[in-house]
Image (tube, rainbow, N blue to C red):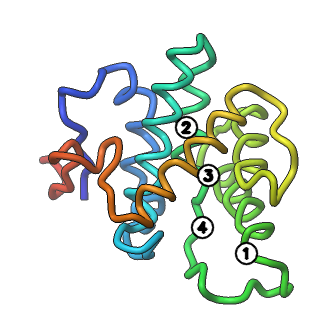
C-alpha cells in the first residue's frame, strides 16, 4: 500500500513525512481503532499535520513536529488491552511508541522527547515548543475524533490509500 497525500497539502509537509508514511510497519496502524470512528493511522496523520502547521506558524521546527506527531502513537497493539506490566495505557504507550520509532526510523532526541511527553499532564512535562505543540494537537484531534468531526487531513479526501506504485 502507498499513502498519497493530496497535492493541495504543502510539498514540504509531504516530503517531511513520506518515508514514515510509506513504511509497511507504520502502515499497520490502520488496523487499530482510535477515538470512536477513526483508526490510529489517520489519527496520527492528523496530529502530524496539525503539529506541522502550528509549528510553522510559530517559527518552530516543523519537520520535528510533523515526524514526532506522526510517530506519537506508533504502537502495534490494541489500546483496550492492559499493558504487560499493568501500567495505565496513557503512561505505557508513549514509551512503546518511542521505542518503535527508534527501532524503525532515525529520530532525533527532540522527536523522542516529544513522543514521550505527548500525554502531558498524564506523562512527563514537554521540554520543547514542538513537544508542547504535539501534546496540544493530539488533544485537539482526539476531541474532534470523539465528536465524529473530520479534522486536518481526514477532510475531503486529502489522504488516499492506493496499491504500491509500479
Identify the residue at image location x=74%, y=68%: 90
Lower position in the chain sequence, tag 3 or tag 2: 2
Q: How far apart are marks 1 and 4 (CA)?
A: 11 Å
Q: 19 or 88: which is nearer to us?
A: 88
**Front tag of 1 and 3:** 1
Identify the residue at image location x=78%, y=70%: 92
Query: Disc 1 designates what residue?
Result: 89
Query: Disc 4 designates what residue?
Result: 75
Lower position in the chain sequence, tag 1 or tag 4: 4
Q: In this view, does 151 lie to the left or right of 33?
A: left
Q: Position of residue 79 (x, y in %)?
A: 60, 79
Disc number for residue 72: 3
Identify the residue at image location x=50%, y=58%: 143
Disc 4, SS: loop
Q: Position of residue 118 (x, y in %)?
A: 70, 49
Label 3 Cα crowd, 10 Å radius (few <14 / some 14-19 / many 20+):
many
Q: 13 or 51: which is nearer to us?
A: 51
Disc 2, SS: helix
- The image quarter containing residue 153 is top left
Disc 3, SS: loop
Disc 1, SS: helix
Dot 3 and dot 4 residues touching (CB under 8 Å): no
**Front tag of 2 and 1:** 1
Q: Position of residue 119 (x, y in %)?
A: 73, 55
Rendered view: 121 above or below 58: below
Query: Disc 2 designates what residue?
Result: 67
Dot 1 and dot 4 residues touching (CB under 8 Å): no
Lower position in the chain sequence, tag 2 or tag 1: 2
Amino acid at each position: 500500500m502507498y499513502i498519497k497525500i493530496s497535492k493541495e497539502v504543502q510539498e514540504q509537509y509531504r516530503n517531511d513525512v513520506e518515508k514514515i508514511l510509506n513504511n509497511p510497519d507504520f502502515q499497520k496502524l490502520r488496523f487499530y481503532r482510535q477515538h470512536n470512528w477513526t483508526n490510529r493511522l489517520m489519527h496520527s496523520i492528523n496530529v502530524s499535520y496539525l503539529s506541522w502547521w502550528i509549528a510553522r506558524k510559530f517559527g518552530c521546527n516543523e519537520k520535528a513536529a510533523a515526524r514526532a506527531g506522526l510517530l506519537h502513537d506508533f504502537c502495534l497493539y490494541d489500546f483496550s488491552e492492559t499493558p504487560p506490566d499493568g501500567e495505565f495505557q496513557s503512561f505505557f504507550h508513549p514509551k512503546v511508541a518511542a521505542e518503535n520509532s527508534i527501532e524503525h526510523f532515525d529520530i532525533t532526541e527532540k522527536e523522542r522527547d516529544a513522543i514521550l511527553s505527548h500525554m502531558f499532564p498524564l506523562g512527563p512535562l514537554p521540554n520543547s515548543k514542538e513537544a508542547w505543540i504535539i501534546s496540544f494537537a493530539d488533544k485537539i484531534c482526539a476531541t474532534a475524533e470523539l465528536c465524529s468531526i473530520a479534522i486536518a487531513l481526514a477532510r475531503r479526501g486529502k489522504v488516499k490509500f492506493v496499491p504500491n506504485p509500479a
